[in-house]
Each structure stands twice: as structure tokens, then as C-alpha cells.
Image: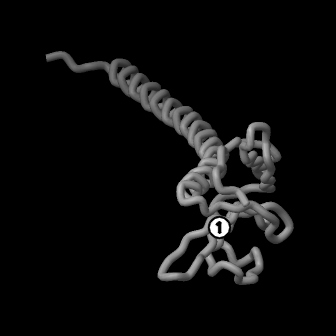
Amino acid sequence: MRRQSGAGTLAALALTCVFGATLLLSLAAGAVVYRRVADRVEESAAERVSLSYITAKLHGSDALRLVDAGPFGDGDALFLYQEYDGTTYETILYVYDGQLMEMLCEKGWELDPEFGEAVCPARALEIGLADGGLLRLTLTDTDGVVHTADVHIRSVG
């Protein structure tokens, strides 16, 4: 029986080390790519969620003809009304302190904007009328990017 030389063992060990180093570098590169993709998805989701959230709430209340727009705090707001056991409640959607906020209270209560629940980051919300009787929602995100949505509303006050 022949004994193997140390050179063959050393070559096998070196090849295994090269394979291991290549594997670790590939994993590290994959982690970096994954983090970039996850960050982009999170950013685009935050951009889409804010306006989608508002329009979905708007469509749900508009079917009942219980939508109004007006000032609240330092900016524009949407007021969505609902009646429960003879009492009318309002959901107010507005921007306060860098967040899109939502507040549910009894209609007519005078509450400060800080009492709402944060939905997602946003810088400003403007509500106006567009051509054709559409309600134009203009939301500025925290990066200063402006997003708009035109929504046909049957019940704006």
C-alpha cells in the first residue's frame, strides 16, 4: 500500500478553503442584495399604502353618502361619518407631526390632532376639487415626493 504524500492532502485542504471562502462571499453578497430589495419594497409599500388607505376608507363611506372634507388642525382632513345606535361618529383622516393620522370620535367633539392614531409617515395632505367633480387627494410623503389620487365622490359636503 502506498502512502499519500502531504502535497495531495494540502491541495485538498486548500481547495476546500477556497470553496468555503467563495461560499461565504456569495452569502454576504446575497445578504446585501436582499437588504437593498427589502428596503425598496418597504419604501414603495409606504408610498402606496398611505393613499390606498385613504381612498379605501373614502370609498367605504361614500357608498353610504357620509363623506365630508374640511380643515382640521393645521391642514386639510377627510371626515367619514357613521351612525351607531342613534349616535353619529366621525373618522377623521389628516396629517399631523409627520404622520397620516386617523381619529374616531363622536361627531362634534373638539379634539386636538395629537389624539389620533398614526397610520403611516406623511408630510402633508391637501384635499381639493379637480375637473369633472373629482375629489383630488394630494399626499406628500416624508421624502417630499407628491402622490395624487382623483376620486369620484357622491357625498362631499
Tell me what residue is drawn at x 70 percent, y 56 percent.
Answer: 156
Residue extending farthest to the top is 2
Circle 1: residue type: Glu
Q: Which residue position is annotated with label 1? A: 102
Quadrant of the image for the C terminus? Answer: bottom right
Residue 16, given in percent of the width and then of the height, sits at: 39, 27
Occupied quadrant, residue 79: bottom right
Q: Is residue 153 above or below residue 2?
A: below
* Res. 117 in view: no
Residue extending farthest to the right is 74
Of helix, strand and loop, which one carries label 1? strand
Residue 52, given in percent of the width and then of the height, sits at: 60, 48
Tell me what residue is drawn at x 43 percent, y 26 percent.
Answer: 19
Q: Is residue 8 above or below residue 73?
A: above
Comparing 16 with 67, the one in front is 67
| Scheme by which the image is coloured | one colour
Residue 153, given in percent of the width and then of the height, sits at: 65, 49
Comparing 26 with 82, the one in front is 82
Residue 138, given in percent of the width and then of the height, sits at: 77, 47
